Image: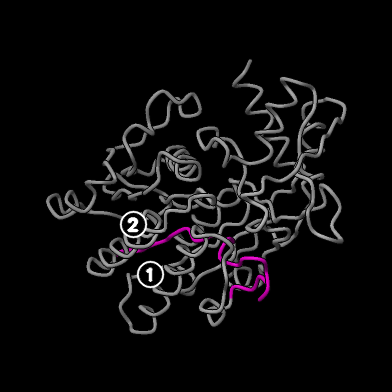
């Protein structure tokens, strides 16, 4: 059951300010709020809201250009329920460290400082990319944050903000409440605009429609067969429920894993897609691009004990059920 159903908005309810509202998780959070009558203010590049068939009927409320956000906040001084910070450059192949520092680190610091000054709740998206190759495991222990070695600049930008946040917490310079979530491999409806960064499910769905088959990367690591690379895949609806839980029942301040706690193979993922589409399996393995091989995560699996200890007891959607729900939405879109 969606967590926000237990809350009752009133005529005077202040809006949630949502960064990245035009993106994948952000637009799903907006849809969730729409369904339950919670007002929102959306922050993103205005072009992200135009002519996207995945977003018909969504009420994004007032839309603020992300480049103008802080000027708007200073001039308008809006009453807010809090900030849900989901906006970032999420391209794991982005190598411009200066750009990533601007988008993923400095922008986030300014939002944290604003929420601290205004004493507002602040929830933000971190990433499982902070764990790198898993040398130190996948435990969301604050003491490990400084030791982690991400495999790409994107992961490092997320790790650096996590470390900065923990230093602010130690110094007592914090929003009224805060929580960060290390998103593992999130999938679900609303990600088509991400292009090459969309989940394998969407790519497989399109390939199966067009050719009857799907492609997966070969393994280039000894002991791991083609297609046996494993990730912790989490359905976007579960991500939204956890965010809502953290807003409804302020949990202990900290940075939490947000996966299912169970790694599954890419073969599992694609087979579930074939099954949901009612098509016979036809899988081809292709070489992983040279540019990705040194930065490729072969395994991720979230330790979910810390989040469960907060009282969050909702079961996570199984991979098969999540893929089936996603495929149904895609098929209805193409009908």
Find out whether the residues at labels 1 and 2 contact each other: C-beta distance under 8 Å.
no
Residue count near mark 2 (Cα–Cα under 10 Å), binned few <14, some 14–19, many ≥20: some
**Which mark identifies residue 102?**
2
Q: Tell me residue 145's x, y (percent).
A: 53, 76
Query: In the picture, residue 120 is in which quadrant?
Result: bottom left
At a point 45% along the width and 60% down the height, the residue shown is 248
Magenta extent: 120-140
Question: Magenta stretch: residue 218 in it?
Answer: no
**Seen from this angle, which residue lies furthest left?**
75
At a point 45% along the width and 52% down the height, the residue shown is 7
Question: Magenta stretch: residue 131 in it?
Answer: yes
Which one is in front in this view, the residue at disc 1 or the one at disc 2? 2
- From where the camera sits, is residue 240 visible? no
Q: Secondary structure at mark 2?
A: helix
40 relative position to 26: left or right:
left
174 relative position to 146: left or right:
left
331 relative position to 20: left or right:
right
**Which mark identifies residue 177?**
1
Q: Tell me residue 212's x, y (percent).
A: 79, 22
């Amino acid at each position: 059951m969606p967590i926000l159903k237990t809350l009752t908005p009133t005529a005077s309810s202040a809006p949630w300010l949502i960064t990245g509202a035009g993106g994948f998780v952000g637009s799903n959070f907006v849809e969730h709020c729409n369904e339950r009558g919670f007002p929102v203010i959306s922050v993103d590049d205005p072009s992200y809201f135009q002519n996207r068939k995945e977003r018909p009927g969504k009420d994004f409320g007032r839309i603020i250009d992300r480049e103008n956000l802080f000027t708007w906040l200073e001039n308008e001084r809006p009453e807010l329920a809090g900030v849900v910070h989901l906006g970032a450059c999420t391209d794991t192949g982005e190598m411009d460290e200066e750009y990533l520092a601007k988008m993923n680190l400095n922008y986030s610091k300014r939002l944290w400082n604003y929420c601290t000054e205004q004493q507002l709740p602040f929830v933000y998206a971190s990433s499982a990319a902070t764990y790198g190759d898993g040398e130190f495991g996948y435990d969301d222990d604050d003491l490990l944050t400084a030791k982690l070695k991400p495999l790409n600049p994107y992961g490092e930008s997320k790790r650096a903000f996590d470390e900065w946040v923990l230093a602010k917490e130690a110094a007592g310079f914090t929003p009224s409440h805060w929580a960060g979530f290390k998103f593992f491999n999130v999938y679900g409806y609303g990600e088509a605009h991400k292009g090459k960064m969309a989940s394998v499910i969407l790519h497989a769905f399109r390939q199966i429609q067009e050719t009857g088959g799907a492609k997966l990367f070969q393994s280039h690591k000894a002991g791991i067969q083609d297609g046996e690379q494993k990730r912790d895949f989490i359905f976007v609806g579960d991500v939204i429920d956890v965010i809502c839980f953290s807003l409804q029942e302020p949990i202990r301040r900290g940075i939490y894993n947000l996966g299912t706690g169970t790694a599954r193979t890419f073969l599992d993922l694609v087979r579930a897609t074939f099954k949901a589409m009612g098509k016979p399996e036809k899988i081809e393995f292709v070489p992983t691009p040279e540019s990705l091989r040194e930065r490729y995560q072969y395994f991720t699996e979230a330790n979910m004990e810390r989040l469960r200890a907060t009282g969050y007891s909702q079961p996570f959607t199984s991979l098969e059920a999540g893929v089936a729900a996603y495929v149904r939405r895609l098929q209805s879109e193409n009908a």
